[in-house]
Image (spheres, rainbow, N blue to C red):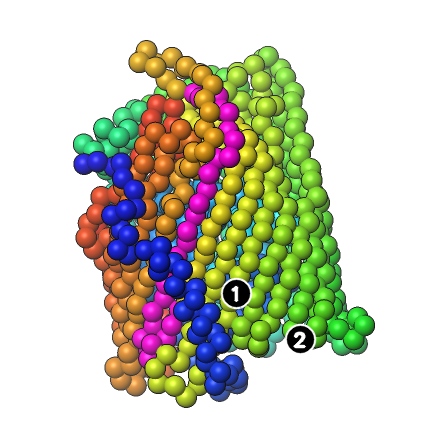
Amino acid sequence: MSINSDFKKTTVLVRPSLLLIWPVILIGCCFGFTALKAQNTSLADTAISLYLSDTVPVDIGEVVITATRTSKRIIDIPYPVSRLNYVDYRHERKLGVDQLLSSVPGMFLQSRYGNHDVRVSIRGFGSRSNSGIRGVRILLDDIPESEPDGQTRIEAIDFNSIGRIEVAKGNLSSLYTNAPGGVVNFINDIDFMRSSVSLFNQFGDFGLQRNGIKAAYRGDNLGVLTTFSNHRYTGYREHNHERWHIVNSVVETNPTENSTLKLLFYFADGYIKLPGSLTKEEFEINPYQADQRAVDRDMKRLSTKGRLGIRYTSNFGKKKNNNFELTSYATVKYFERASREYRIINRNGFGLRASYGNQSKLWGRTNEFAIGVDVLYQPARTEYYDNIGGQKGDQINQLTQEKIYNNGFYISDQFALVPERFFVLLSGRYDKVSFDLKEETLPSRIDSRSFDAFMPKLAFHYKINPWIAAYTSYSLSFDSPAKNELESLDPSELYNHDLIAQQTKSFELGIKGNIIRDDAYFFSKLLFEITAFDMNIDNEVVPYEVYNEVYYRNAAKTKRRGLELGSTLEILTGLSWSLSYTFSDFNYKTYAALSIAIDSTGSIVSSEEDYSGHVVPSVPRNNLFSAISYALPISQYVDAFAKLSYHGVSGLWVDDANTDQTDAYHLLNGLVGLEMKVGGLNVLLSGGLNNLLDEVYVGFTNTNSADRRFYEAGAPRNYHASLNIGYRF
């Protein structure tokens, strides 16, 4: 089997002419439906029960996003944003975040080891990470899951407790630390109206078993959500077992009529064994085998982490047009990592965020002002041992104490240049990220690094009518290296002092909207967004691997251009079709690199290489997702659901040298479900088959591996089934 091809095989699916026609069709629809009007429906009249939460069908003009640091409707935000509610993915397998967000235009997700090492990439940011998430800020209930240095793992996110997912794409560095690609906010389902209890049960191929319970209580002035999940998965590759226990809890009350107090808690504990990456020859022989070194070393991660947060919000003033929020949280994290060496890491963190917002009239025009501050502090103690067949040696080889600081503040103001029509947004953020490292074993050494910058953004937003808006923005971003990216290949140094922060200049132009015809039988709703972007990156941080250990270096200049297209069309009542397409043209403009390789004797060999003009690896030029779904009421008490989706991805370059490219792949997935509602009882039975054609494909590229272990297989054909039983009181 050859894995060196491009997307020419699939031009029948994505022709360049179609890429030009689609924006024209959608924009034409926007201005052609002159008889259309925005939907105005009373929430009290339309409130319905779907699954175990009270959900209302609302249009883009009503959907509110909080990931932008203020609560704003999608139509009023001058950059592309998406929101997924639980009802949108309740039938899905929900094993990993990649199975929920692949339909969002501009995002590309690759699952390496289940949900616990998913590469989340937005406009190429995040593609540089061979482990964990970088360049995209991850939040859980508006609190950073990302570490102070920007590195993120998402073991603690339980999709059975998540009520909605918000995605803000594009450069958000003027609001968040290290967020040049955007922000993903996972929000627990505390917005329910009635008390309930439910049991989750899921099983499937490769030893998948997920069981859990969700309890929700709603009193006069109290809301409590608690979920527990037990997750077991053998995996479709050798040496790829995992097991997790996750507890999530949210307690909400209102001290006064205009204030809210929340307690937010989670605890996650588990482990995952890692199969490692393969060479091209190994992949062609058996793509599901493990790297023998991973087996011999019993490569694995054991994790225990918890967080407790408290949040107070208040609206005040005569018109209640002032908002104040104060959030404080503490984290406890314990990790064991068995790789070439054995590490034990203890991290305890503290975070504080405060913000103030005001909405008022200025010169007779609407003005929205916000200011905020973030403080994150995380000390860490790391012990290094020999790895003896997956067990730590008796003798400690190295002991380090590290402190990471991230302090920043932001300011934002949106002003209506033309009332209700034309707006300008100015925002900016200053961040300082500092690292202090002390080695306590001999030879005793200390080291430090510090990065700081101010990131401004200017955006314009024009509402063509109440349900269609155009926007454009120009911004700067600063992305400091994460702790693991600062590790030095030179054993005489604690930090890599050659690595500097990458900086990006971003421009984007787009249009979005939601067109609704209340009385139409066919094509009654059309939701769409089209965004074009252009970015210039200086000193892009890129990975390379030596002996299964990942290190990082700077490329000189990178040019990224792209187009994102997303639409959802309700063909007729219950029948919907969705499409998302991303075109990415990412190239290194100038890049003189130190090339690292391993020769036949196992020695490290370095040389100077010129990668100017090469394509950025691990990002597909074409990424297409399409799905058709149908919800059918069978009777007064029973509803049926079916969905068929297609995901097509062009070949990925595996390294900066562009020495090899993976095959394009095409995945078909199917879902069916039945939901029964009798009184307060709710029963949901669903099942699905993923990768219907059983295609063998590279699901994750291990970028810039020095010993050419680039390839990790995606999941073969697999089934899953769920039985969820709940009762609302």
| Residue drawn at (58%, 51%) of the image | 507
* Residue corresponding to mark 1: 511
Mark 1 neighbour density, 10 Å: few (under 14) some (14–19) many (20 or more): many
Q: Quadrant of residue 628?
A: bottom left
Q: What span is colored magenta in the figure? A: 568-596
Task: Judge whether residue 334 can be spotted in this image.
Answer: yes
Side of 415 where 73 appears, left or right: left
Q: Quadrant of residue 602?
A: top left
Q: Nearer the viewer, residue 273 or 581?
A: 581
Q: Amino acid at mark 1?
A: Ile
- Quadrant where the N terminus lies? top left
Q: Position of residue 469 (x, y in %)?
A: 56, 69
Q: Nearer the viewer, residue 486 or 273?
A: 486
| Residue drawn at (39%, 74%) of the image | 50
Was residue 229 drawn as part of the magenta stretch in this picture? no
Side of 568 where 415 appears, left or right: right
Q: Secondary structure at mark 2?
A: loop
Q: Amino acid at mark 2?
A: Glu
Residue 562 position (above or below residue 74):
above
Q: Position of residue 80 (x, y in %)?
A: 53, 60
| Residue drawn at (62%, 15%) of the image | 444
Task: Judge whether residue 317 can be spotted in this image.
Answer: no
Side of 661 where 474 appears, left or right: right
Residue 602 position (above or below residue 405):
above
Residue 53 position (above or below residue 97):
below
* Residue corresponding to mark 2: 420
Q: Are marks 1 and 2 in contact (CB under 8 Å)?
A: no
Residue at mark 1 to residue at mark 2: CA–CA distance? 17 Å
Residue 468 position (above or below residue 292):
below
| Residue drawn at (51%, 67%) of the image | 512
Q: Position of residue 157 (x, y in %)?
A: 46, 52
Q: Quadrant of residue 724?
A: bottom left
